Amino acid sequence: MVGKNCFAIASDRRLGVQLQTIATDFQRVFKIHDKLYIGLSGLATDAQTLYQRLVFRHKLYQLREERDMKPETFASLVSAILYERRFGPYFCQPVIAGLGENDEPFICTMDCIGAKELAKDFVVSGTSSESLYGACESMYKPNMEPEELFETVSQALMASVDRDCLAGWGGHVFIVTPTEVQERVVKGRMD
Amino acid sequence: MGDSQYSFSLTTFSPSGKLVQIEHALTAVGSGQTSLGIKASNGVVIATEKKLPSILVDETSVQKIQALTPNIGVVYSGMGPDFRVLVRKSRKQAQQYYRLYKEHIPVTQLVRETAAVMQEFTQSGGVRPFGVSLLIAGYDDNGPQLYQVDPSGSYFSWKASAMGKNVSNAKTFLEKRYTEDMELDDAIHTAILTLKEGYEGQISSNNIEIGVIRSDREFRVLSPAEIKDFLEEVE
């Protein structure tokens, strides 16, 4: 979700196989560089492999071009990598959030074969995505400061995953501003 | 010298540590028509002689300066056909970069990849090195840039450089005339004067080619009419 010169990216913490919960501290939001984060929902193995491949590409890019990748460029790269597997896809929906030129917040999501969707306010993915769309739509306000953004994102996330039996067990929220990153674990219904 | 015994195979070092085929490629470049480039504070200019073998040749069909991307241009000294192949490969690489990142390729990256292609042809079987040296001029987020790429695949960033027949005179002339804060129009005049120095015969708007890139980041080859204006200013 986009705020004033900042953005928030959050996920739940459940890792499960249909109805069995395997872990309650699974990390789904990863850092690419200080001002670029990617959240990967869907099949856990694909999320981890895709993250490793993206970090690999980004590190090579950093070495060759001696600079960090811009969020828009990174989104194009993720889209290209996903489309390479058009007929045997990664079962992942990424959510990309970063601070671009002049620290402008940038967010986008895509489907598992790389169809990019840019947004100015919020993007969602995962099993509770329909719930999340509703919650974010009603709670979102433009130009929120980091503290207010954190409250809004946490409330929207908790409200949506509580209604979804395949998601939950707490939340993991990152608030990223040009100067710092706040990482917080939100306590929710543990069921 | 034992060197000549090693000049048959590209992929064999001579005892003196040289790849003799590359030396020969540089000789081919050195007998090509003079070309030069100058990096100004607000742009880059590249220029070359365009001496045609006969007055019957249609000079509008000969284009020695080519654009690789909208903001990067290139000129050469040496073998024209080799140049055409390299231009084709570089353009493809630039487009592949754009397709992957939806961002225009930075000048240094394109130079690096073109140089890598030229190096491949010095370390494979059954091929020969390219008989051209390139001067690549571009303007991107790091400002105006000018690079020279040799047949061996080594590349250098230059403030001003020349290649081809008249290289030593041209470089001496450029060394004297170059200033750090030169503006692009001054640089174009200096380029024309440098070409004039070594030109056998009368220089005119039909037998030189000039390409410029300004801070608007659009690479353009000047038309004969524009070249004529600059020539008149220089006289």
Image: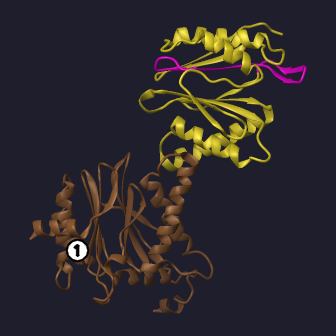
Chain colours: A yellow, B brown
**Which quadrant of the view contains residue A127?**
top right
As for residue A24 lying within the magenta part, the answer is yes
Front residue of this view, candidates B71 and A119: A119
Residue type highlighted by circle 1:
Ala
**Which quadrant of the view contains residue A23?**
top right
Point 48% across, 42% down: residue: A67
Task: Specify whether B227 is left or right of B140.
Answer: left
Point 45% across, 92% down: residue: B1
As for residue B121 lying within the magenta part, the answer is no
Q: Quadrant of the C terminus of chain B?
A: bottom left
Front residue of this view, candidates B86 and A120: A120
Residue at the spot of label 1: B170
Look at the picture and state if A137 lies above or below B26.
Answer: above
Residue B202, percent across and down? 16, 82
> Magenta residues, as a range?
A1-25
Look at the picture and state if A133 lies above or below B171.
Answer: above
Look at the picture and state if B106 lies above or below B168.
Answer: above
